[in-house]
């Protein structure tokens, strides 16, 4: 039997609706079967749809299930931030004053608030070498030359990404992947590259759209990120928190990136997502961004 449930659609990694990555949030998923959740996720046709449930872990404030159009994820970044934002806006009260704790299939995820911005503590990320034959196939599907790839690594913090550190942001933005070939290979692929310093400092000024979205005082992004997920029905994800979390853990440790920076993602899709990354003194990587509610209402499920 269907019932009316509170619903919100939150744009994440932006303070201005339409510029980030939206997540659909059903604020009471109690009593819904897996098939009903998956059906609704296919219907929203967003990269992720989430369902908030009572926690079963003592330290958790709420439990979250996360679905793409093609299946369930154990963890994902922008759904974590957007769902927490929606839960708080709906009157959710965390047990601790300085932390919100989300329970998901990956485990417990700590979140913190800094003004209006939320950030999650990046879960542990497993790393592994990419087999040469697989790397060659992915490089070809992306239309890259081998010399444009500086590093390659498997990164897995729930979602598993074959991740490439490329020779620059211009290479990242110029990619026109063969999504059918990537789907046939069966791997999600993340790519990133650094903006040259002169372009990074003027990136927002060069784009009137981004200037309106972020304002003159916005911090310029250091790197450009893209995420291709054709095997799960999402050719390109606008802004990807889980990928940015694993990237930060990998590349900060490798000495490629500083302990604090801003990543841009979504540019190739006409978005202007901004991911704020910081590794604290204890070594925890925090991945944060602004959120804005675009839709609030009810759904019948």
Image: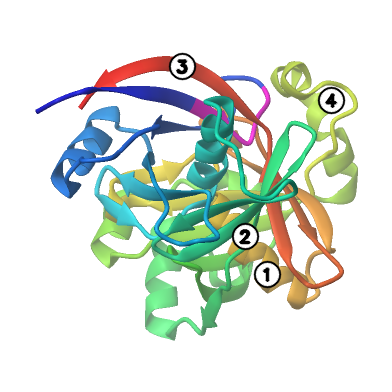
Q: Residues within 10 Å of mark 3 (few under 14, many from 20)?
A: some
Residue at 53% of width from left, 78% of height from top? 126
- Secondary structure of the residue carrying numbered label 3: strand
The part of the chain drawn in magenta is 10-15
Along the viewing direction, whichever of 198 and 19 lies nearer the viewer:
19
Q: Is residue 166 visible?
A: no
Direction from residue 34 to residue 133 in the image, left or right: right
Q: Earlier in the sequence, mark 3 or mark 2?
A: 2
Figure check: 85 above or below 248: above
Identify the residue position indicated by label 1 in the image: 249
Q: Residues within 10 Å of mark 4 (few under 14, many from 20)?
A: some
Furthest residue toward left = 1
The local secondary structure at tag 4 comes to helix
Q: Residue at x 33, y 58 (%)?
A: 182
Residues at discs 1 and 4 in contact (Cβ within 8 Å): no
Q: Is residue 14 magenta?
A: yes
List x then y, in percent, for residue 69. Answer: 27, 42
Q: Are marks 1 and 2 in contact (CB under 8 Å)?
A: yes
Magenta stretch encompasses residue 116: no
Residue nearest the viewer, comparing 57 with 6 = 57
Residue 11, located in which quarter of the rendered image?
A: top right
Quarter of the image with the N terminus is: top left
Residue on which disc 3 sits: 295
C-alpha gap between disc 3 and disc 2:
27 Å
Circle 2 — which element?
A: helix
Mark 4 and mark 2: Cα distance apart in space: 27 Å
- Mark 1–mark 3 distance (CA, rounded to whole Å): 33 Å
Q: Which residue is mark 4?
A: 205
């Amino acid at each position: 039997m269907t019932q009316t449930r509170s619903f919100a659609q939150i744009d994440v990694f932006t303070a201005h609706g339409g510029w980030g990555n939206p997540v659909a949030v059903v604020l009471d998923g109690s009593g819904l079967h897996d098939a009903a959740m998956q059906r609704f996720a296919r219907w929203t046709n967003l990269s992720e749809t989430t369902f908030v449930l009572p926690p079963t872990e003592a330290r958790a404030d709420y439990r979250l299930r996360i679905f793409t159009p093609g299946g369930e994820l154990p963890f994902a970044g922008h759904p974590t931030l957007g769902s927490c934002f929606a839960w708080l806006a709906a009157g959710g009260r965390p047990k601790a004053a300085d932390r919100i704790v989300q329970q998901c299939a990956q485990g417990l995820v700590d979140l913190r608030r800094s003004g209006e911005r939320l950030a999650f503590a990046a879960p542990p990320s497993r790393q592994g070498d990419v087999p040469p034959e697989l790397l060659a196939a992915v490089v070809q599907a992306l239309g890259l030359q081998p010399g444009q790839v500086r590093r390659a690594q498997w990164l897995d913090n729930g979602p598993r990404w074959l991740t490439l550190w490329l020779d620059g942001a211009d290479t990242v933005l110029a990619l026109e992947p063969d999504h059918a070939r990537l789907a046939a290979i069966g791997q999600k692929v993340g790519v990133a590259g650094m903006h040259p310093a002169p372009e990074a400092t003027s990136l927002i000024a060069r784009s009137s759209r981004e200037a309106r979205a972020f304002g003159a005082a916005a911090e310029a992004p250091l790197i450009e990120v893209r995420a291709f997920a054709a095997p799960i029905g999402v050719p390109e994800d606008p802004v990807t928190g889980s990928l940015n979390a694993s990237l930060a853990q990998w590349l900060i440790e490798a000495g490629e990136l500083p302990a604090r920076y801003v990543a841009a993602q979504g540019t190739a899709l006409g978005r202007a997502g901004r991911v704020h990354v910081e590794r604290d003194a204890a070594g925890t990587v925090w991945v944060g961004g602004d959120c804005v509610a675009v839709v609030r209402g009810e759904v019948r499920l």
